[in-house]
Image (tube, rainbow, N blue to C red):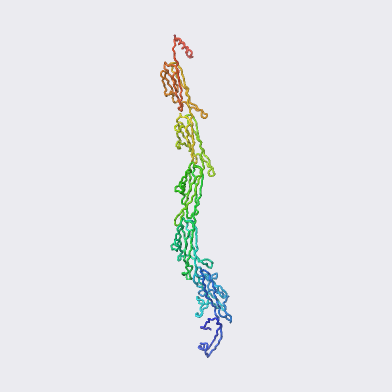
Amino acid sequence: MTFANSKTYIDPSVKELGARVRIAKKANEIESPTGMAFSGEVEDFKTQITHPPKGEFKETSGPQAAKQTATVTFTARGEHLYERNSTAVIDETVEPYIVDKDGNRATLDADGYYVVPGQGKYKVTANGKDVDVEFIPEDNFLGTADGISIRRSDNNGYDTGWSTKFPDQEANINGQLNTMDGLYIPTVTPIEIEGVDKTSTDVQGATQKGTPTFNTTGSNSNGDKIAISPSAEYPAKLLDPATGLTTDAPSVTVDGEGTYTINSSTGEVTFTPDPSFTGNAKGVEVTLSAPVGRNKDGKVQEEYIKTATAKYTPTVTPIAITPTDKVSEDIQNVPQTQTPTFDLSNDKTAKITSKKLIDPATGQPTDESTVTVAGEGTYTIDPTSGAVTFTPEKDFVGTAKGVSVQATATITNANGKTASITSDATYTPTVVAAVPSASPATSKDIQGATQVGIPTFAGTTVQVNGQDKAIAIKDNSYTLLDNDGNEVSSTPAYAEDGTTPIGTFSIDPATGKVTFTPTDKSYTGKVTPAKVQAESSNGIKVDTTYTPEIVPVTPTATPAETNDIQGATQTGKPEFKGGTVTIDGVEKTVEINDAVPATFDDGTTKKTVEGVGTFTVAADGSVTFVPEKSYVGTAPAVTVVREDKNGTKASAIYTPTVTPVKPTAEDVSSKISKALRKLVNQPSLKVTHVYQ
């Protein structure tokens, strides 16, 4: 039986109703429950009334990203079905559940949450007859959420998913589903943001980057603060250090420090330091005005926009050059080379661009590749490699003062600007004395003889860097030095006075043997020494002397005498012998030069002495004297001159004597007898006849 237009009671205090069932044969007799009926029957009775449960509408409000909780109350009404005087209760054996917008049981995630994308997630837990609700908003959700509908049942089996039929007298609890389900709606309010300063560190000249960040002052349910990032719509901006105000310009410059450029969409700040800047920069401030979240419609409300400032501070580590001094050691007069080194602490933005010598005279770097240190030598740098070559003066030995090398490193930033740093290193060479020895030579020989002498030159051995190094005499380095110090193979030889030329010196460059060839064979005595030089393998030239001595040799002469009668021609020959001396135990003679004819002391070969006679000298020194017929007595001596092969002259006299002849009266026969007797005494003469 169906009763149409039944009335629902909204008063839960009404526990039962009276009921009448009336039947009749005519319909009009039952149109009214009361009144007269002429047929049928009327039955009156009472029936129990049950009332379904109701939920509660609950709202909460909390800060952004913070978990909100609430307890939604559920109320059972009326009496328990079929049990009089027994109150209906919420059936706690039946778990409450969330109802989606379509009135269906909501689907939960693995953790038991009902997730509303873009808003948050809900979890319901029975708390006796009531329900505890937990809402965890998404980090960037703001405003009033859609909320959730919660449904429970009572022990009558009725749930809260019913709707009022008399909304003017009893409104539905749940305005979303128009039911009596519990309704929970949370509201999320925005919180402030704060800036997080950033720092960075890099080497001098290098571009650095840092991104100051922004987040909420409060944390989400996980304890994390919510990052608020700039975007093209809500850009990050720089604060101009000069004005302290926000600028729309993408870059600002801090004098003496560098340029800061911001990517407004990301907030990343690029710092391009001046290449000369080092240390902690003043930095730059970045400001951001951006929404901390959006409502369920994805809209940004004015109160959602928050502003904060953060600072970016870069630190620039200076680049340094570490110099390494160098030393070297070698023998005298030999070039030495070393390379002072320079190491960059970081070559990211820097490189060594030059190496120069420091001029000892000025103390300043010079563009010249060679400098001279008086008394030491010259230093020459290879500007590419930085190798320094020391060429010592010939006579310099010991540790040199050395030279300084200045390296320049150029630091270049991303904008092409440059700065320079410098560092000095020293190069100190040591020169070990290595001079060959030289001993003079002498010789002695007779006048006119060619002489030879060999001065002694010897190398040496020295220690260099802990090792023996032999120094030898260079092949074919023997030479003579003339009066001007020039190297020559021959040179005039001078008398002891140093000015009178008397011969020549010549030398064999391979052996060092010096030959003295006299040209003036008349000179005797000491000869001005010849200077003889040799060069060692390390280029040291040493000299000594060769001194020949000429021993005089004088020829001897013995006078001659003859005697003959008056008028007779006489011939006499003085005796000439070459001079003889002993040299180093060896007897040496200079012979008479037979190629040069003898003469008288006046250079003539014939001499007439009036009243005496005529003298004639032959080439061999024989003198013929033809006296005048009347001359008798000892004639004046004549001097005969001869010379030896050196041209040294010797003289001797020739003295003839003329014996007078006195006539006698002896007869002819007497004379003949004497003559015959002489003849008879001749063994081959036979006298056959004598005439009277």
Q: Is residue 357 visible?
A: no
Q: Is residue 56 visible?
A: yes
Which quadrant of the figure contains the C terminus? top left
Among all residues in the image, which is located at the extreme top?
Answer: 692
Q: Residue furthest front?
A: 243
Residue 594 lies, in percent from the top left, at 45, 25
Location of residue 301 in the rendering, given as x and y in whole percent from the top left corner: 46, 70
Q: In the image shown, does 52 or 628 lie closer to the viewer?
A: 628
Viewer-proximal residue among 420 and 180: 420
Residue farthest bottom in this picture: 38
Q: Residue 233's image quarter?
A: bottom left
- The image shows residue 14, relative to residue 70, as above or below, that is below
Frontmost residue, 383 versus 158: 383
Identify which residue, 377 or 689, lies in the foreground. 377
Q: How many marks?
A: 0
**x and y percent of residue 429 in the render?**
50, 45
Give residue 388's position: percent from left, percent from top.
Answer: 48, 47
